[in-house]
Image: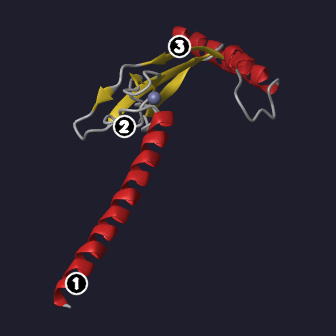
Amino acid sequence: MSETLAESYEKSQGVRDFLSLIRNYQGITELDATIVNALIDKILVSEREKLSDGTVQQEIKIYYKFIGFVGELHITPTKRWTALKPKNCTVCGVEYVPRSAISKYCPECRKRIRKAQETETKRRSRERNRQVCIELSAKNDRLM
Ligand SMILES: [Zn+2]
């Protein structure tokens, strides 16, 4: 019983210390490293866990200075979080982080290749049109 009381006293003392620490950072809009270091003792990130419904869950426990562990954050990593491993571009060999598993080229090369493909498609369709014209005129020649 007395232990619990001591514990809760300790905790409320911790909260007070924590709050006075936070007060120094009033008006912050962004957490920079200094603030994070000042307020947070440690952050534990669990392994990603794949749930039966296919979603991925990761547990992040933040231990604040003075008050310790407050609560669990359950986060579902977004696509960006589940970023794929860096790959080497099959054209220039540069290492890049692919946006999809089937990606083969770095953004630079992809741009270049897409452009080349577009030009090629245009050239082909122009050629095809020309072909049709020739066929038509040949047909007309025969008809005449
Ligand atoms: Zn490349």
Label 1 – label 2 distance at C-alpha: 53 Å
Callout 2 secondary element: loop
Q: Which residue is mark 3?
A: 4
Query: What residue is drawn where x is 30% and y is 65%?
Result: 128
Tell me whether circle 1 and circle 2 mark residues in contact (CB < 8 Å).
Answer: no
* 71 left or right, relative to 8: left
First in residue order: circle 3 vs circle 2: 3
Kindly indicate the quadrant of the structure image that contains residue 42. Answer: top right
Query: What residue is drawn where x is 33% and y is 69%?
Result: 130
At label 1, the amino acid type is Asp
Query: What residue is drawn where x is 30% and y is 75%?
Result: 133
Q: Is residue 100 above or below residue 7?
A: below
Label 1 – label 3 distance at C-alpha: 104 Å
Tell me whether circle 3 and circle 2 mark residues in contact (CB < 8 Å).
Answer: no
At label 3, the amino acid type is Thr
How many numbered marks does the figure carry?
3
Q: Residues within 10 Å of mark 3 (few under 14, many from 20)?
A: few
Callout 3 secondary element: helix
Q: Which residue is mark 1?
A: 141
Q: Nearer the viewer, residue 120 or 127?
A: 127
Label 3 – label 2 distance at C-alpha: 53 Å
Q: Which residue is mark 2?
A: 100
At label 2, the amino acid type is Ser
Callout 1 secondary element: helix
First in residue order: circle 1 vs circle 3: 3
- Mark 3 or mark 2, whichever is nearer to me: 2
Which quadrant of the render holds ligand 1? top left
* 140 left or right, relative to 93: left
Q: Nearer the viewer, residue 121 or 27?
A: 121
Q: Nearer the viewer, residue 14 or 108?
A: 108
